[in-house]
Image (spheres, rainbow, N blue to C red):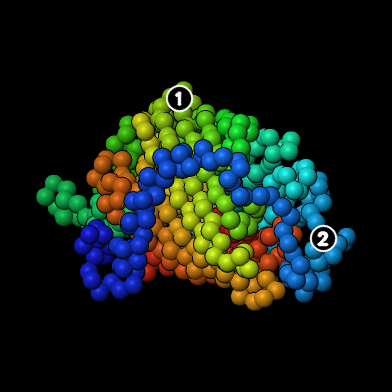
Amino acid sequence: MHQNTTSIIPDAGIGYFILKYVMKPLLLVAACLPAYIASAQNTSPITDTITIKPRDTSGIKDLSDYVKFLKKPGGGGANAAIVPHKMYTNILPFMGYNPAQGFMLGIAVAQAISLGNPDKVHLSTINYGANLTTNKQIILQAKSNLFLKEDSWLVKTDWRLMVFNQNTYGLGTGDPYSNGNGAETDINGVKNDAITYAQNMKYKYMRLYNSILKKVAYKTYVGVSLNLDYHFAIDDSRANADSGGHPTNYAAYNTRNGITSTSSSVLTGIGITAIKEGRDNTIRPTKGYYTNLAFNFYPSFLTSSGSATQLFFDARKYISLSHKTPTNILAFWYWTSLLLNGKLPYLATPSITWDTYNRSGRGYVQGRFRGPNMMYLEMEHRFPINRNGLLSGVWFINATTASKDDKSIKLFQYIDPGYGFGVRILLDKKTGTNITADYAWGLNKSKGLYLNLVETF
């Protein structure tokens, strides 16, 4: 049984040591990052050494050098430069498995294009895919990160349409049996068995996130966003199936917050966003940083749960460990979502693996942790395995903390770690696109295999 991190038994081994002496202090420090980065962003362009330049691919091999049908016509020499306005497309049909979706069959497409002089503009990226799973899920996704007019404008989109079913585990981090999500209750003096904390829900989901930002200073963009989360045809199958009289986590949340619409939920809002883009490559960074600070406002007439205000912050840092081997790097990722006032629909509360690229929380099933307030931290070491760059490896650790809406669970009260390792196969040496395969573990025997295109962050 998971316990508060201040009282985990000493024989928990390396996982306990990492959690207490590495991840918990780092997560506390990361909570202070917004103020630190705000001051750091005043750095003069003269002292900022991050540059944009085509990848040096001399001596580098990718998968197309070994698999003939992947070779692209007109690919140029070993170190051919990125051609402006030429779309570089990588298509990966795949079969995979993870606990949330079961076995899946689908196709993933990663595209990159330089919409200007490659020496002066970032690569623009478009990622989309379609999946069918043995859990009777249909997943369609399209996401873009477009740098326009010589990097003077940035357009970001995240569109999804899903027929989905997924277990939910209540709000907050920690073991559901010890933190009140699904724990046994006493009703009229009669002790009832706890409802199984993995409660399945079926629903359809549409996400339309759109942002447009103008470059206002060196590597700094400010703009607006329009975000829509629409969950419909919601079937909380356990709500009426539990003979013990226990409400599901979804039903209990709606009751606590006075939400009467249970078959659908709408969350529509307008955001103000500021992004600092300091990565040398947006697909496979080897140095630099990225920050995204957003205030999202959800007026009551555009939501089904009343008005709300939300703060989101995302920060990433890449440190090269070798001048001779730039792909040997230490990467850090921190994000937090804080509900400043109001309330959110249950399925729209922040949750692991529901970030833009579905990458957070390796070691746990998608949606395992959610809450109105959430913080996430990850560290990953990326290193080459062979000299020609075809194969590389990673090891990583992460930590998640989330609160509960009734304040019975607070941030940092429980911190749940994950850890794992993975391999990378270079699919496109010009853009740096990788095929990624990771295996990760979490607490309470949680584990999973994760297959994707491009780096985790």
Viewer-closest of 46 and 71: 46
In what quadrant of the picture does the C terminus appear? Answer: bottom right
Q: Which class describes the residues within 10 Å of circle 1: few (<14), some (14-19), or many (20+)?
A: some
**What kind of residue is marked 1?**
Pro
In what quadrant of the picture does the N terminus appear? Answer: bottom left
The residue drawn where x is 57% and y is 52% is 288
Residue 236: percent from left, percent from top: 41, 46
Viewer-closest of 126 and 100: 126
Residue 69: percent from left, percent from top: 81, 69
In the figure, is residue 364 to the left or right of 75?
left
Residue extending farthest front: 46
Q: Could you tell me which secondary element the residue under label 1 belongs to?
A: loop
Residue extending farthest left: 189
Which residue position holds label 2? 80
**What kind of residue is marked 2?**
Ala
Which residue position holds label 1? 299
The residue drawn where x is 34% and y is 69% is 15
The residue drawn where x is 17% and y is 48% is 187
The residue drawn where x is 46% and y is 60% is 379
Residue extending farthest bottom: 386
Q: Nearer the viewer, mark 2 or mark 1?
A: 2
